[in-house]
Amino acid sequence: MSGRGEVPDGTFPGDPSTPPAVLATPWFVPTTVRSVVYRGGMTRPNPRAVYDRYVTRISDQSAQLVAALDGADADAAAPVPGCPGWTLAHLLRHVGGTHSWAETIVRTRAAEPVPDHEVNDVTPGADDDITTLTARLTRSTARLVETLREAGPDATVWTPAPGGTPLFWARRMTYETVVHRFDAAAAVGGTYTLDPGVALDGLDEWLEFSTLPQAYESQAAHRALLGPGRGVHFHATDAPEGTGEWFIDLSGAPITVSHAHKKAGTAVRGPLTDLLLLLYERRSPTTADGIEVSGDGALFTAWLRGAGHWLRR
């Protein structure tokens, strides 16, 4: 999902007997609905409202993706910079297929992995054109959105990582679409903007995935990142006050992530959207791409590559 020309088979790698990291707060619960102390008597967000917001975002992001291509006289054979080896035809088949795959899982209340041929088999057809492909994506998105709304956030369904409810799929498909909208815009030389709140939650989701041993290529790759005093500090320079900082503790297992300002051997700074695209390898850790990395750059590179393995399968 959200890969760079390679997509997962629906499971995380590694020894299936290895339990997921134990977190102080389950990684799959969005920050917006976690148990926190609210100031001034603020009301805790309604989980259903948060879920509905994700579902709406899937629809909105997909519509923006289609609009970016419809208004650009796009060619289905145009290469996609963020997904080496892919054209827009590959990309649109993948996004539509991924929406269809998730829809099937939720609609059937799948209790085990569902074949993901629609996700992986993205070879363009001889008659592929942008109009046909975007229409197919629009239909797939509409079915997914309808199914998610009917299911609600609490049904029991299979998920490839901890979660087990449609909330997992609503959040995951939001950022699947967010990132691939960027890919589509880049392929046609278009502009790309993202709401800061969406980027903030997208960073949360990716970083929470990075704590799971199953997200890495192997147990050895996971252990290789660990060491006394190791950590990565992220700072989003345009985040609202009191948000936009993360500390990834690599000092030992389990890896944890917290919203905290802590001294780390590696520090990464940049705008929210650029940081999100960096994690998905659509930006490079350079000032030219709006990113500043200080300290142990080699550790950052190794961590990013290791923690992002689940995206490249």
Image (spheres, rainbow, N blue to C red):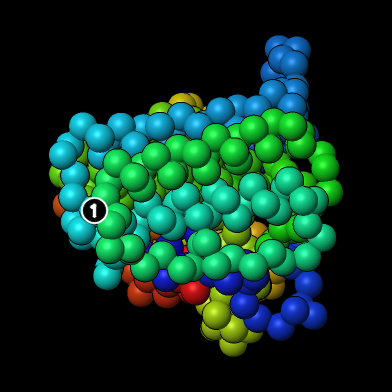
Residue 225, percent across and down? 53, 77
Q: Amino acid at mark 1?
A: Ala
Q: Place residue 11 in its image quadrant.
A: bottom right
- Left or right: 101 as drawn, with respect to 60: right
- Left or right: 114 as drawn, with respect to 281: right
Q: Is residue 85 visible?
A: yes
- Left or right: 151 as drawn, with respect to 209: right
- Residue sitting at x 69%, y 23%: 49
In the displayed structure, would residue 203 be above or below residue 194? below
Identify which residue, 132 or 119, lies in the foreground: 132
Q: Place residue 189 in its image quadrant.
A: top left
Residue 220, percent across and down? 59, 87
Q: Report the residue that reaches farthest toward the front.
A: 127
Identify which residue, 65 or 213, lies in the foreground: 65
Instruction: Identify the residue under disc 1.
Output: 76
Element under label 1? loop
- Residue sitting at x 78%, y 65%: 112
